[in-house]
Image (cartoon, grey):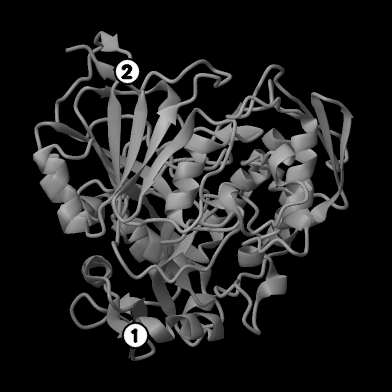
């Protein structure tokens, strides 16, 4: 299983449809009426964290597997870390970095007194070496995105790092999430050697044992710069089948059951010894209009179709609270997330807009214009029963508006080609978002046609200007305001109908305190502060 990339990615998400609804933010139980009360805690103990996947290596620069991404939070530290709500907090940096007015220089002040697991001192040289390691042509790095925009990494003193970019790179906060030890890797083969399966980091835990096809055991790092973790050990248990994983959670063999599918959601919610978390993630479900289709060239039609949907009702009937309604395209895991309110269904206004466009009821409730019915096909990739059910509900809601929509399910294997060539009238699918809000590839008119990702065909000079401005503005607060404006224009122009962000589903055993699922950083991001309730 692969982790999500930093940039916007076209994701042919064909499994686990979620829809707008009651997805919770942060650490909230999904058990109705339950209120978590403070309790006394005890130090020590062990947490068993289940996973469907066993990694090949533990160096996150050489693998994009979810398991490696998760375990790297135990072993390594980065310069900054994203909290579940997208807010940044310092990690190896002792405070959030400063950015020059031109956006080309980022300065980090590092913590002093930090040591590697082997006792060596961490310094700015390790940060510079990490960049050199990634950019080394011999390193089989999974990606050099962003690091290749850096002109130099300067270390004016042992605890200051100055990163200088060749050009503005808007997603600089995602860089240096793992710092590697120069004293162990300088001059060594960057891809092989004992380090790749038994790394030394500055993180809260160190690898104690790797039992093949069974699990990895991590012991508390007594030298950790935030203080020794409360737990003695974290066991990353390999359970290669989700049915078995859920069974072991029910039997108490595992303490955390992460990333389970919707089919297991009701099962886990029924377990009285577990707390279930539904955390907004980066997968964005939406309906895209082809704005070059004759029907959707009329803005009033698009606006009416958006007003004709009851997204909350869809959530209640199809998703049962495992999604969060989307106002626009920025996910809750991003620091740029904004929710200006989901417009309620308004059939009266929708019908008025359609009447203004010449669509009137002739025979019964179905709308016609010049003897032709208001009808089109909604294209959906195959293989996802929940999405197909949601699409059927959408078709029914539009029927109540007087619009005839045919559901067109296409082979998932061919969907990307269908998507990029834009033969559809309207399509219902998902994208995967990153933490950074840069959305030029999807909304700027430059990327219409020839396989570009602006498949809606949205041509708006103001959007073109705003997407460029958003990607070249250094100040994060100013950028957030820009993307809020883009969201508002999206709601007005309706090139797409935002539906919802899927939730990541996790469960932790009652009595485990501090577990806070984090779709951006991985669920082990704050394992150093987990505790068990006192017996």
Residue 520 visible in the current orientation: no
Which residue reaches farthest bottom? 371
Horizontal and vertical percent for residue 337?
53, 41
Label annotation for residue 44: 2
Horizontal and vertical percent for residue 427?
41, 75
Q: Residue at x 16, y 49 (%)?
A: 246
Mark 2 Cα shell of 10 Å, populated few (<14), some (14-19), many (≥20): some
288 vs 154, left or right, is left
391 vs 129, left or right, is left
Q: Depth check: give the residue in front, 214 or 150.
A: 214
The residue beneath circle 1 is 410
Q: Depth check: give the residue in front, 165 or 111.
A: 111
Horizontal and vertical percent for residue 172?
71, 44
> Where 306 sits versus 150, above or below?
below
Instruction: Report which quarter residue 191 is drawn in.
Output: bottom right
Residue 257 visible in the current orientation: yes
Q: Residue at x 61, y 49 (%)?
A: 437
> Where 399 sits versus 169, above or below?
below
Quarter of the image for the N terminus: give it: bottom left
């Amino acid at each position: 299983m692969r982790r999500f990339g930093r940039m916007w990615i076209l994701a042919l998400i064909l499994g686990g449809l979620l829809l707008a609804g009651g997805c919770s933010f942060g650490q909230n139980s999904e058990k109705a009426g339950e209120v978590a009360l403070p309790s006394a805690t005890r130090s020590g103990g062990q947490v068993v964290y289940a996973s469907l996947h066993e990694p090949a290596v533990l160096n996150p620069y050489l693998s994009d597997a979810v398991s490696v991404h998760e375990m790297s939070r135990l072993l390594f530290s980065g310069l900054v870390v994203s909290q579940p709500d997208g807010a940044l907090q310092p990690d190896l940096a002792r405070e959030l970095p400063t950015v020059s007015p031109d956006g080309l220089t980022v300065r980090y002040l590092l913590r002093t007194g930090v040591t590697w697991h082997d006792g060596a001192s961490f310094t700015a040289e390790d940060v510079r070496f990490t960049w050199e390691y990634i950019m080394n042509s011999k390193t089989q790095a999974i990606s050099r995105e962003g690091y290749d925009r850096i002109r130099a990494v300067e270390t004016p003193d042992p605890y200051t790092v100055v990163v200088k970019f060749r050009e503005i790179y808007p997603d600089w906060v995602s860089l240096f999430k793992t710092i590697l030890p120069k004293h162990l890797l300088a001059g060594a083969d960057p891809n092989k050697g004992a380090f790749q399966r038994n790394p030394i980091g500055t993180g809260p835990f160190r690898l104690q044992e790797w039992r093949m096809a069974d699990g990895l055991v991590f012991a508390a790092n007594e030298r950790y710069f935030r203080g020794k973790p409360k737990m003695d050990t974290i066991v990353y248990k390999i359970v290669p089948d989700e049915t078995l994983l859920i069974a072991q959670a029910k039997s108490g063999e595992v303490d955390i059951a992460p990333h389970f599918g919707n089919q297991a959601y009701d099962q886990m919610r029924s377990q009285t010894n577990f707390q279930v978390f539904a955390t907004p993630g980066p997968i964005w479900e939406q309906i895209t209009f082809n704005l070059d289709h004759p029907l959707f060239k009329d803005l009033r039609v698009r606006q009416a179709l958006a007003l004709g949907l009851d997204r909350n009702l869809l959530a209640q009937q199809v998703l049962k609270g495992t999604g969060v309604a989307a106002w626009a395209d920025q996910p809750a895991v991003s620091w740029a997330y904004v929710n200006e309110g989901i417009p309620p269904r308004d059939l009266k206004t929708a019908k008025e807009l359609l009447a203004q466009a010449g669509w009137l009821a002739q025979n019964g409730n179905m709308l016609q214009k010049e003897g032709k019915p208001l009808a089109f096909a909604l294209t959906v990739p195959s293989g996802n029963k929940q999405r197909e059910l949601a699409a059927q509900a959408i078709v029914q809601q539009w029927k109540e508006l007087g619009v005839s929509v045919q559901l067109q399910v296409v082979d998932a294997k061919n969907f990307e080609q269908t998507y990029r060539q834009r033969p559809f009238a309207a399509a219902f699918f998902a994208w995967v978002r990153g933490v950074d809000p840069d959305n030029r590839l999807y909304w700027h008119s430059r990327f219409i046609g020839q396989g570009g990702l602006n498949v809606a065909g949205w041509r708006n000079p103001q959007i073109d200007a705003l997407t460029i401005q958003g990607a070249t503005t250094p100040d994060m607060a100013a950028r957030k305001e820009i993307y809020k404006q883009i969201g508002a224009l999206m709601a007005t122009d309706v090139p797409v109908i935002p539906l919802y962000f899927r939730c990541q589903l996790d469960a932790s055993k009652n009595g485990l305190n501090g577990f806070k699922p984090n779709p951006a950083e991985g669920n082990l991001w704050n394992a150093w502060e987990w505790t068990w309730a006192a017996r």
